[in-house]
Amino acid sequence: QNKNPCFNMLYSTDESAKDYRQGLESMLQRYSGGPVLDLDQLVRSTLKQQISTHQVPAYFNNNYLVFLVEMQISEWAQPFLQQRRHFMCPACNRDKVEAAFSNITQEMTNS
């Protein structure tokens, strides 16, 4: 049973091994209690769609651009999450999220 708080998680990794990514997502799902979304897949599928409709050139489909887009999303999300925590969710605190990550780290170390 999940003892951690329920929170949505968006993750990215530079790892390309499918088994590793699936294992990571499974482990994150156990500890988040909420949806776990692979940001790499979301960005790549959006790029492929934009390329197929000729909105952007095909050479945009590269790891560096995916990384840049993910960094922009991260930079955009941080202030929003801080605002949400402060105004909309006074019970939310960093300790709960960090406790879940500690559990994940411990599980990865023991594997």
Image (cartoon, rainbow, N blue to C red):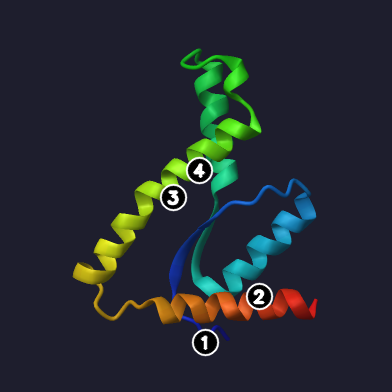
Q: Which mark is residue 70?
A: 4
Q: Residue at x 54, y 47 (%)?
A: 39
What whole-number distance in Å separates the C-alpha atoms at marks 2 and 1? 16 Å
| 59 relative to 109 in the view: left or right | left
- Residue contact at pointers 1 and 3, CB within 8 angstroms: no
Asked where in the image residue 104 lies, by quadrant, the reply is: bottom right
Asked where in the image residue 107 lies, by quadrant, the reply is: bottom right
Q: Which residue is mark 2?
A: 105
- Residue contact at pointers 3 and 4, CB within 8 angstroms: yes
What whole-number distance in Å separates the C-alpha atoms at marks 1 and 3? 27 Å
Q: Amino acid at mark 4?
A: Glu
Is residue 77 positioned above or below 90 on the image? Answer: above
What whole-number distance in Å separates the C-alpha atoms at marks 2 and 3? 21 Å
What whole-number distance in Å separates the C-alpha atoms at marks 3 and 4? 6 Å
Look at the numbered disc 2 and give the secondary structure of its residue.
Answer: helix
Residue 47 in the image, given as x and y percentages of width and height:
54, 28
Judged by depth in the image, the label closer to the viewer, 2 or 1, is: 2
1 or 4: tag closer to the N-terminus: 1
What whole-number distance in Å separates the C-alpha atoms at marks 1 and 4? 29 Å
1 or 3: tag closer to the N-terminus: 1
User: Neighbour class for label 3 at 10 Å: few (<14), some, many (≥20)?
Assistant: few
**In front of the other: 105 or 9:** 105
Q: Residue at x 52, y 87 (%)?
A: 3
2 or 1: tag closer to the N-terminus: 1
Q: Which residue is mark 3?
A: 74
Q: Residue at x 64, y 28 (%)?
A: 62
Judged by depth in the image, the label closer to the viewer, 1 or 4, is: 4
Q: Amino acid at mark 1?
A: Lys
Look at the numbered disc 3 and give the secondary structure of its residue.
Answer: helix
Q: Which residue is mark 1?
A: 3
Quadrant location of the C terminus in the rendered image: bottom right
Look at the numbered disc 1 and give the secondary structure of its residue.
Answer: loop
